[in-house]
Every structure is written in C-alpha cells, then in structure tokens.
Image (cartoon, helix red, strand yellow):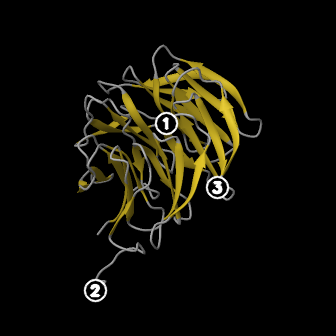
Amino acid sequence: MQHINRKSGLFAPTMLLTGHEGEVFGGEFSPDGRSLATGSFDKSIYLWQVYGECENVAVLSGHTSAILEVHFSTDGSLLYSCSADKSCAVWDVEAGKRLKKLNGHTAIVNSAAPSRRGPPLLVSGGDDGTVKIWDLRARRCVHTFEHSYQILSVAFDGNGERAFAGTLDDTIMVFDLKEREHTFSLEGHADSITGVDVSHDGNFLLSNSMDNTVRKWDIRPFCAGNRQLHVFRGPTHDAEKSLHRVRWSPDDRFFSVGSANRQVYIYDVTSTQLLYRLPGHRGAVHEAVMHPKEPIVASVSSDKTIYLGELD
C-alpha cells in the first residue's frame, strides 16, 4: 500500500464513522483537533477519535429528544448542546457526564452557541420565538429576546457583546447584550435562515437560507454602505426544511456547508470560488466542519453516518 502525497494524519483519505441510530444533525472538532463530537436524532452525543481507527470513545446521554447542535468550549474541556427536548446542556468531556441542564425554552431549541471570549455565555434560539442568553457560571438565563417567529440559528460575535439570530421570517436579528436591545437586522434572504456563523476575527457573518443561498455580511459596528457582501449559490435545501448549517474554517479562509443534495460544499471566501463539492453521503448533509489544524472536513448526515475526508 503506497501512501503518496497524503495531506493529513488521517488513517485513510476517507473514514466512515458509524454507530448513531438516527440522523446526525451537528458535529464539531475539539480545539486540539484530536476529537470529534456529533449530536443525533438518537438523543446521544458521540465522541470520536479523529486519528487511528476513528473509534467512538464515549457516548453522552441525558437529552430526551433529538440533539440539534453541538459545540466545544474554547479550551475543549466542555461541550454544549441543544435539543428538541426544550433544553440546552453543558457536558464534561473528560468525564463524559452532564454538568448542567439549562431549562427555560418552551419548545424545540434549534440552535445554541458559546461565546468565544469574555464571560462564559451561551446563546440559544428556539421554536418558542425566543433568543436566550445564559450565564454558564450561574446556570441561569440572564436575558430573553422575544420574536414573533421561530429562531432557527444563533451565534455570538467575536467578543460576546452581540448575538445574531437567523429566523423563520427571513431576517438575521442583531442584539446588543449590554443595552439588551435588538439593534438592527440583516435583510436580503428570501426564506428562513437555518445557519449563521461569525468569522473568528469577528468581522463577518455567514448565513445559510432555505432560499438556496449562503450570504456573507459585514457585521463590524461601523459599516458604511451595504452590509451584504456576497451571495453564494450551490448548496440546496428541500421540502424536508432541515437545518443546514454553515461554518467558517478556523483560519477564516474557507467555509463549509452541508446540502440537501447529499453533498458537502467548500468555498474560498476571498475569491468566492467553489473549491470542493464532495459526494459520498446517502442522505442530506446537515453540517460540515473543517479541522483546526489539518486539511480535513467532517460531515454529518441524515443517513446516520459521519465522513472524515482529507482535502487534497
């Protein structure tokens, strides 16, 4: 067996991870790149080793319904999840145990994301039309923003001062956490927004919508002119109306997005070119994430599987 021109430490150029008993909705690499966490319709979070045989090393149980999004803390010691059981949770990765259950939503929690800097906060959004800000030190909701439509996707800005919410009624709402008010909205999408993600430098936001576009926005506080910078086409949504996310690469040079047509799309942000369209899954791809240190992409799908693929 020849190992010519291998670009990563993956055991093989493509690794198929199986074990979940339902659709896999979310995935994320740990900050050190050694682990992958995935959340599924089967109510469990699986932790996988990225290298070697990609073994499943832990199963985190406690949610009583589908898990829709998962994120690691910046130091990799904690995991955050949200679920159709109307709750969010904080997990100890090492111990494989739930530390906190965050109750307060009255319907499915579609999305949750931790702050990257500043105090340890979590933002969550759900079918109850609320965006909730949680102080993880106090295990309590410190503020609730109300909206008349479902919230499908949420994210913090770079320093935890603003929160962004993609809504069922086609807008991205921007909330100022200090003033506790809705400051403005990003408008341009023609359908529900299922994924939002802020660049690691905090300057730009990507949004994925059921209008079959991904858009890039300038979210700097003092932006002169149009905040909408580019419209990307390619990834699709379908009648299932699933939550397809969009994710920046750790260096902000690329972004990856899952698609209803079973493919993974990866774009170069600066040139706006489509670099890869990766087949393999037998069902819709809900999320695709890039590895923090190597050219590896992980994709999670309604076919119950996860692919780890090396990018050439």
What kind of element bears circle 1? Answer: loop
The residue carrying mark 2 is 2
Q: Residue furthest top?
A: 148
Q: Position of residue 76 (x, y in %)?
A: 62, 57
Mark 1, Cα crowd under 10 Å, few <14 / some 14-19 / many 20+, is: many
Q: Residue at x 28, y 86 (%)?
A: 2
Q: Give the position of the N terminus as an image quadrant.
A: bottom left
What kind of element bears circle 3? Answer: loop
Q: Residue at x 69, y 28 (%)?
A: 141
Q: Give the position of the C terminus as an image quadrant.
A: bottom left
Front: mark 1 or 2: 1
Q: What amino acid is labelled 2 in the image?
A: Gln
Say which quarter of the image contains residue 212: top left
Q: What amino acid is labelled 1 in the image?
A: Ala
Q: Residue furthest right?
A: 138
CA gap, disc 1 and disc 3: 19 Å
**Residue 93 shows which numbered tag?**
3
Q: What amino acid is labelled 3 in the image?
A: Val
Q: Position of residue 219 (x, y in %)?
A: 46, 37
What kind of element bears circle 2? Answer: loop
User: Between residues 43 and 159, which one lies in front from this camera angle?
Assistant: 43
The residue carrying mark 1 is 66
Q: Position of residue 274 (x, y in %)?
A: 24, 53
Q: Residue at x 55, y 47 (%)?
A: 71
Q: Mark 2 and mark 1 in contact (Cβ < 8 Å)?
A: no
CA gap, disc 1 and disc 2: 42 Å
